[in-house]
Each structure stands twice: as structure tokens, then as C-alpha cells.
Image (cartoon, rainbow, N blue to C red):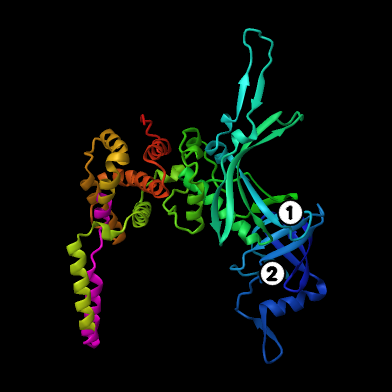
Amino acid sequence: MLTGTLQMMGYGFFFTFNEERLSLIPKEEEKDEIRYAWFYTKLGTGSFSWSGKPKFVEEDFLYGRANETNLVITFLTNKHTQLQENNGIITVPILAYFFSYSERPRISRISFSGLELNYIHPINRTFEISYKPEENDGKINISTYDFDSTTTEEQKFNVFGKEVQVYFGVTRTTSLSIEKPPLALSSSMVFHFEETQDYSFVRELYRIAKEFIQFLCNRRNVSFTDIRLSNNQGKVGEFNVIEESIEIEMKPLKDGRYIQQKYIAGYEGKILDDIAENNLYIRHLGKSFRDSRIIDAASFVLRTAAFEWEFSRLFSEDEWKSEQRKILEEEASKELERLIENSTGKLKKIYKDLKKSVVSYLSLSQKISQTFEEYGVTILDKFGRYMYKLNNISYNHSEIAERIGKQRNNFAHGNLDKEFINESLLDVVFLEQIVLAMQLQYFGIDEVETKKIINEVFRHNLII
């Protein structure tokens, strides 16, 4: 528990903070003034009543001084959640916080470390061990490679119009303490940017970094053990985000179910650009690896939604239409537009509805078939044939597409009376792999690397 003082919305407060909840205690002489100004409405009789209007914090950031450390603590507030008041104590919703030696420090660098990063940019490839077993003298030499050998080439992406550089590196920590190992290695992902005091920008970088690791691990329960802020003068402090605790899963990491940095080298910036713009579809990812293995109506529909989103980014539906079809659609639209202009009332509405249906769109089944046509031979068939043979189901592109389309429609339209298509369970498992292949192809990653990624993330153990 930390205590201290801070200013908020024109008043001074004593605060308590338990790393999750920020509680503000006003000065005794200002307690009633704040309560009536923020949470009550004065009636014509001179009495007060609960206003019923929620009160929100107005500042983006609050700056306090902690009694226990004498450090400045900066709180990033949640301006969309209302303040709560109970017996004069006000609870302020907080998104994140960090400590620093000075108020309003400038930030130009944020470094992320964590368990998943140690695998994505493997720490076991950053050193060598040598010894002479024949001498049997107990001497073992551990030598780390230099920084240049363990640091990736910088890539660039943009956030809110600002350029950010990203690279992966390895931190070396030595110690003579008995409690700690003499040498500890940890991988980190580093973002560099122009110095700023906009800590909302820093929090946005956290969101982008986390979704990037979620994409690479194909699941949502990823975390960072350390997030360090710094500037041109040196270290500023550790960034802490307030969010629900997650289940730590070692099995998918030990099994190699993640995308290694070496496979996406040179494309990190493009992927991060997509995440910054909210263009990379990851809503279909399971909450955990264990959760991702459970297929229900919701996860089925989400995977098909992910597919349709990625299809729209890779292809234009006009590509699959004949020139004659395009001409006829244009002529029909013009004719219906003429009828709309020369009609009124219900007839006009009917013509408008007809115009909407003139342009034909590919069905989900057709889109899946077209994707097989594009990537089946070069990428997908190797894994599809293996999976379907393993389950004694015929591997046929059109049948897979038709089953997924039918079952998705049954779920989406609430057709509970329709019998579940058993084979579609395997189809939608394969569809998740198709989606990842499409995403990788969109970023420009070559077919061989894409197959290596699919092989490892979904643990096919095939020879690529």
C-alpha cells in the first residue's frame, strides 16, 4: 500500500494506492464542498439530492508524490468510467501508472520483456558453452555473443502519425549475489520514438506490443514481466498496466507453438502498422491455448469472420467476376436508378431494395474455394491432406468450403433445428490455419517461411 498527496480537478487530496485501486481522501474542510459540487444537485429549497449524473475525472494524468519512496507516481486515468464516492472517499479508475524521479518526465523508449519474448527471440541462441571433458577439472566457460549479433535490424511503423522504430535484443544481467544466478539473459522488444510527455501514446504502444505478441503466439493470454521507460538521459521508470491477471501457459511455448522472430524478420514494421490501425484481425484467437481447442458456435463464427476480413484485404471481389457480369450489373444499376428517380412512395422503396441486390457478392463458400485456388497447391494442401487423412475424411476443397458455409449460416441465423455437420469441426480447425496463412501472405512473407510457421504454430511436425 502506498500513500501520498496529489492534485485533481482543482483540489488537493491524500491518496492510498494498492497497485489496483486509487482512493482519494479530501481535506476535512473541503469534503462537503467536493461532495456537493461533484455528486449532488442543489434544489430550490436549499437542500441537496443525488444528481443522477455520473462524474468523470477530467485529467488524463494525475501526478502524486509517494510518502514511502519520495518518488513521483504518474497515474493514467480512465476518463470513461465514473468516479465513485463513499463517505467522502473518492475512487478514481486507473489504467496504468509508473514511478519517476521528476514530474512529467519525457519518454522516448519503451522496452518489453517477458516469457513469450524469450522464445520468440530465443535466448538460448545468444551464447556458447565450452569445456574440456577430458581434463575433468570442472571448468565451464559461458560466453555471450556481442550486441550486434543478438540485436535485430530496426524496422519502422507509425502510431498516431508518429514514427516508431522497433527491434529485438537480449539483456545481460550479472550478479555476485547468492540468491541470483551469476548471469541472466532475457529477450526484449524495444520501441524508440521522439520524446513525448503524452503517456496515452505510451499506453497505446503497450496495446500494440501486446497484440503483436498475441498474434505471434496465436493466443490472447500473453504477458510482459517488465516494461521499462527511458529517455535520452537514461531510465525513467517501470510502466505498470492495471488489467485482469491471466493464466500463464508453458506448454504451447515448450511445444514451439509460436512464430519465431527470424521468420518475420524485415516485416515487423508492416505487422505493427496493421495492429496500430486495428486492421489485423485477432478477435478469433482463443483466450488461452487450452481455450482455443474448444469449438463452439461463437468460436466457429469468429473464425469465419476472421477469414472474410482477411479475404477482403487480399482480394477484390471484382477479380472473380467476368467482364460481361460487370457490364450487366452496371447497366441494371443505371436502369434502376432511372426508375427510382421517376417513382414515389412504396414503389420507390422497392426499386431501391432491388438496386441493392443487383451487385452480386461472393458467398463464404465461394471465398473459401477461391482461397484454395490461390494458395491450395503452394501452401495449404500439404497440411490439409495430412490433417484430413489423419481423421479419415476426404480432402476436397469444394466440400470443405460448402460445409463451412452451411454450418456458419446455421449458427449465424439461429437454425437450431439443423443437424450439426460433423466434418465441419475439422474444417473450422483447418480454417484457423488458412486465416494465419492469409495474414502472412498479406504481409509479404514468402511461401516457404509461411509453411514453416504453419508447421510449427499448429505442430504438424511435417518436413518443409
Residue 173 x %, y % = 70, 34
Mark 2: which secondary structure?
A: strand
The range drawn in magenta is 341-369
Which numbered disc covers residue 86? 2
Q: Up-down: is 197 above or below 37?
A: above
Q: Is residue 285 left or right of residue 321?
A: right
Name the residue rendered at 26%, 57% in the picture: 319
Residue 394 x %, y % = 21, 39
Mark 1: which secondary structure?
A: strand
| Residue neighbourhood size for the residue with mark 2, other residues' Cα within 10 Å, grouped as few (<14), some (14–19), many (≥20) | few
Q: Is residue 246 magenta?
A: no
Residue 321 x %, y % = 22, 59
What amino acid is labelled 1 in the image?
Phe
Q: Is residue 349 magenta?
A: yes
Mark 1 or 2: the one toward you: 1
Task: Say which residue label 1 marks.
Answer: 99
Main SS of the magenta part reads helix
Residue 240 x %, y % = 66, 52
